[in-house]
Image (spheres, rainbow, N blue to C red):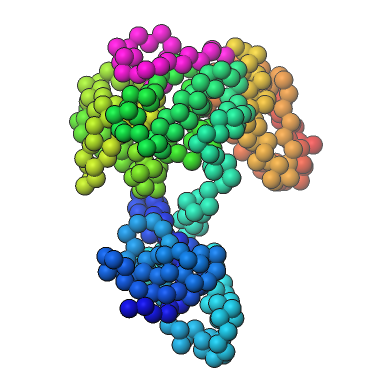
Amino acid sequence: MLEQSVGYLLDKKTVMYNNKSYEVFKVLDWVSTISFNNSDQIPAHTICTGDYADDCVQTFNNNTEDGLYVKTSDLSESIEKNNNIVIFSQIREKMLDGLKGTYLYKDNNNQLEAITDTDFLLQVERTFEPNEESLVRPDDLTYLYLKIKEAIFYQDEQIKNIVSIIIKNQKLANSNLDIDTICRLKTNFIVEGPTNSGKTAIFKQLKRIYNIPIIFVDTTTYGNYYPDDIIKDILNNLLQAANNNQTLAEKGIIVIDDNDLEKVGVEIAIKRILNSNPIYFNNLLFNPAKLTIVNLRQKNNNSAKESWFTEKIELKPLDRNTKKIILKESTISPLYINKIFLETLGIDLEFSDEFIDYLINKYWSLNDIEKEVNTIINKSLGDIIKTKKSTLSIGPEKQYVLK
């Protein structure tokens, strides 16, 4: 039977927060609908008003999948809110007052509650409204290449090769080809290079700007784990990175550090994932056939596991002058990051060539350099606040001057 209804149009997404799954709803509109039972006898609505007119959606509380739903309102109460004036546009405005664009989550009592936890809200906003950079089209090779080049220097050809493989694999994953053909055509690959050549940094940049779940697997953390436990941990992490969206997780990227790939448990687990046969865990049948597997390793590592991968990309070692340029200009340089941060506080950061030489002479790892720079910044901030200076200039050794 067809009935006229009104209610809130909600966009539902599953959001992972603190290792827990939440059903979260964004209020899109207050709409008029024709409600009916579909062929499966599930209550549904055809929307009659607004930007979503003619869309057919299910009724709230029948929601098992992410998507659009209508939570019906009492029409009489809605009219009363508008002083019993029956003008739809006015009633809609009243019903949406302060609600449109807000996020609600379903609590343990199946009721919708406002989100007050700011960290939770931030995660929700990232899920519903990914920033512009995360909306990269799967075929936008030039954009990905240029964005990664802003952070990783002197590996241009290698970055281009990596991005090309990733995009090809994503096109295969989104194609209508059968699984066997996808497995034959996709590329799982090795990225080889010395410490601090940019192996991990390339994929961290890719994770930041590309809307595909990417996880990093440090094999040293697994100790004497059984293979099934390792597989479960890896796939759970991948699902979490995909906000519990299994379809998206099955197209994800697993980046494996080759520190200890020779361990029996790790070797068996990775090989089972590479074999592309469906894996049953946590009451899910997970198909890894569309995954991209990347192995990061040191140069001249003659591991027998090389035969598992179809291509190898070698990164160039970085000399002293290159590292100096990276510290000055790369968007992931600790000096650049701190400079941007201090600008938000109204403070200019200056640093001399002697200070950069000091950092390069003392450290090789960017992580160690970042710790040293952060220590200096933290120490100087107190003095800046006291003296109300606006410029922090870091000179030879760790000496700093306020101007």
| Residue 28: % across, % down | 51, 65
| Residue 305: % across, % down | 30, 15
Asked whether residue 85 is drawn in magenta, I would say: no
The quadrant of the image that shows the N terminus is bottom left
In the figure, 32 relative to 264: above or below? below
Q: Is residue 179 left or right of residue 332?
A: left
Nearest the viewer among 355 and 195 is 195
Which residues, given as a range, are shown in magenta? Answer: 295-318
| Residue 84: % across, % down | 54, 91
In the figure, 186 relative to 41: above or below? above
Nearest the viewer among 21 and 156 is 156
Q: Is residue 380 visible?
A: no
In the figure, 70 relative to 244: above or below? below
Nearest the viewer among 83 and 260 is 83
- Residue at 49% in and 83% down: 78
- Residue at 53% in and 39% down: 137
Nearest the viewer among 135 and 5 is 5
